[in-house]
Image (cartoon, coloured by chain):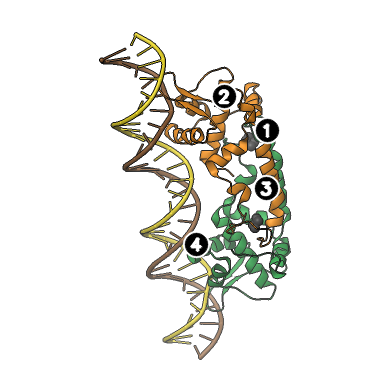
Chain colours: A green, B orange, C yellow, D brown
Amino acid sequence: MFSKACEYGIKASIFIALNSYEGKRVSLKAIAKEINSPEAFTAKILQDLARHSIINSVKGAHGGFEIDKYAISSIKLSQIVNAIDGDSIYKGCGLGLHTCDEDHPCPVHDKFKSVREELKDMLEKTNLEELALDIKSGVAFLRT
Amino acid sequence: MFSKACEYGIKASIFIALNSYEGKRVSLKAIAKEINSPEAFTAKILQDLARHSIINSVKGAHGGFEIDKYAISSIKLSQIVNAIDGDSIYKGCGLGLHTCDEDHPCPVHDKFKSVREELKDMLEKTNLEELALDIKSGVAFLRT
DNA sequence: TAAAAATAGGATAAAATTATCCGAATAATT
DNA sequence: AATTATTCGGATAATTTTATCCTATTTTTA
Ligand code: FES
Ligand code: FES
């Protein structure tokens, strides 16, 4: 469904959010360990998220990644997915036609529409805070 | 959402079904042209579908691909997707955890569940016949 | 000011997906 | 029997995605 990069991006964001509530910055190393991802690859993704202003990165000793505590509840899953995978999952044709167009639909267009709408809705309505709280309360997990 | 291979496989199956209603076999060349796909790559996918008994292939002059006319309405989109992309789209964890497990869910598990269920349902309920008829009646298209 | 602890980012490599080429096999037609 | 029209399948190549390595830069601390 999502690229590996996007999966890592989502998991990393959740972990950063979790720590940001406690005012803690987290290092790349700690993130990669927690979400079980390759360190250098994860670094690229975090840079990407930082460029999109979804997370903040701080260089130097005592540096790391963080998210403004008061922004966490307003960051939507869709922003992360969009920053990394782009919008083709919402907007692209399910059968790869050049554009998804009501007036020139592919054979699965109508059937797909509701699924895609639901996915879009879900991503646009789900925020980082709820996801982070599920980790904190131990009802959800970031690895294996 | 789906791999290119799967997109081609679905479109090819629809085109083959369409012709099979009229008792016509279609050649690889005709298929690739119709669905705007690379010929040799499409050949591999068709072989795959044939091995999964979703389509029949006939070698030699006057050969080509066909689907048993009476089977068309019973072939589900899910069978095609499964043959080519496997079942990870239904069964795999949305965040790439080793397994999607109710008892050890990832943070998006609950949110994803309904989207995935709807996708699964749609794929399992949609058959080749309805898709082919939309092409025949001109309300849907296989290219650009 | 030097050392240490971080991220940034360019260059590369490995793996997976997508795409191409070509000879072998098969079947109908001449 | 030869020719022609096909699919099959192995080898290879191109592209994209995923992953790694190394150096530069920034910031804190001693
Ligand atoms: S045209 Fe294919 S999904 Fe809309
Ligand atoms: S555990 Fe991730 S989707 Fe079920």
Relative to residue B67, is residue C13 drawn left or right? left
Q: Residues within 10 Å of mark 3 (few under 14, many from 20)?
A: many
Q: Secondary structure at mark 1?
A: loop
* Residue A47 image position (x, y, % from top left): 54, 63
Amino acid tagged 3: Arg
Q: Pointer 3 and pointer 1: residues touching (CB < 8 Å)?
A: no
Q: Dot 3: what SS?
A: helix
Circles 4 and 2 on the same chain = no
The residue under label 1 is which amino acid type? Answer: Glu
Please report, as a chain letter, where disc 1 is located.
A
- Cα distance in 3D space between marks 2 and 3: 30 Å
Asked if marks 3 and 1 fall on the same chain, the answer is no
Whether labels 1 and 2 belong to a single chain: the reply is no
Quarter placement of the C terminus of chain A: bottom right
**Which of pointers 4 and 3 indicates the residue nearer the eye?**
3
- Residue with the mark numbered 1: A102
User: Is disc 4 surrounded by few (<14), some (14 to 19) or many (20+) residues within 10 Å?
Assistant: few
Residue at mark 4: A41
